[in-house]
Image (cartoon, rainbow, N blue to C red):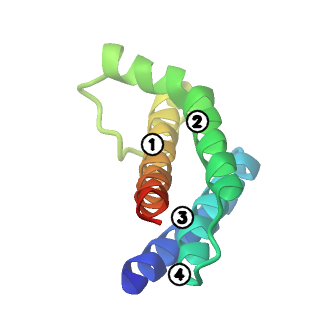
């Protein structure tokens, strides 16, 4: 598990670093750094429920903030590629990528929440 913790922490740290060139980097850098903190703390046996709670809330806020663009993409522009370049006239593509990143972060944090619950039930 230590290798998984380290890989996830490193992956989300890289995600945070590439957000610095984003049009709205503050939320995304903070969210990815917070998600990276979860497996990093787990690696050292220091994870607690408050970090998990804050991480879940921040990821949910990020999903809500960018979710409208993702819904627009799914309902009106599915034929377009999500990996096309940035274009101010197609913000739904950027918001779709942001939503998927937030959902990925939420999935990782949820994994640690479930893992913590299992440990609590055993102990």
The quadrant the N terminus occupies is: bottom left
Residue 102: x %, y % from top left? 51, 44
Residue 104: x %, y % from top left? 42, 50
Q: Residues within 10 Å of mark 3 (few under 14, many from 20)?
A: some
Marks 2/1: CA distance?
8 Å
Label ID, residue 15:
3
- Residue identifier under label 2: 60
- Badge 1 or badge 3: first in the primary sequence: 3
Residue visible at 33% across and 22% down? 74
- Residue identifier under label 4: 43
Q: Residues within 10 Å of mark 2 (few under 14, many from 20)?
A: some
Q: Work out whether residue 28 can be spotted.
A: no
Closest to the observer, 13 or 109: 109
In screen coordinates, is 81 left or right of 2? left
Between marks 3 and 2 in the image, the one whose residue lies nearer the viewer: 2
- Residue identifier under label 1: 103
Image quadrant in which you'd find residue 61: top right
Marks 3/2: CA distance?
17 Å
Q: Is residue 116 above or below residue 46?
A: above
Asked whether disc 2 touches disc 4, contact meaning CB atoms under 8 Å apart, the reply is no
Between marks 1 and 3 in the image, the one whose residue lies nearer the viewer: 1
Secondary element type, mark 2: helix
Image quadrant in which you'd find residue 88: top right
Between marks 1 and 4 in the image, the one whose residue lies nearer the viewer: 4
Asked whether disc 1 touches disc 3, contact meaning CB atoms under 8 Å apart, the reply is no
Image quadrant in which you'd find residue 40: bottom right
């Amino acid at each position: 598990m230590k290798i998984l913790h380290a890989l996830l922490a490193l992956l989300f740290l890289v995600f945070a670093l590439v957000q610095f060139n984003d049009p709205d980097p503050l939320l995304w850098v903070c969210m990815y750094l917070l998600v990276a903190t979860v497996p990093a703390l787990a690696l050292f046996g220091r994870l607690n429920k408050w970090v998990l709670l804050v991480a879940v809330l921040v990821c949910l806020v990020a999903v809500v903030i960018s979710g409208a663009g993702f819904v627009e993409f799914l309902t009106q522009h599915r034929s377009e590629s999500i990996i096309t370049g940035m274009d101010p006239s197609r913000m739904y593509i950027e918001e779709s990528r942001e939503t998927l990143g937030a959902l990925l972060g939420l999935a990782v944090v949820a994994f640690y929440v479930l893992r913590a619950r299992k440990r609590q039930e055993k102990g």
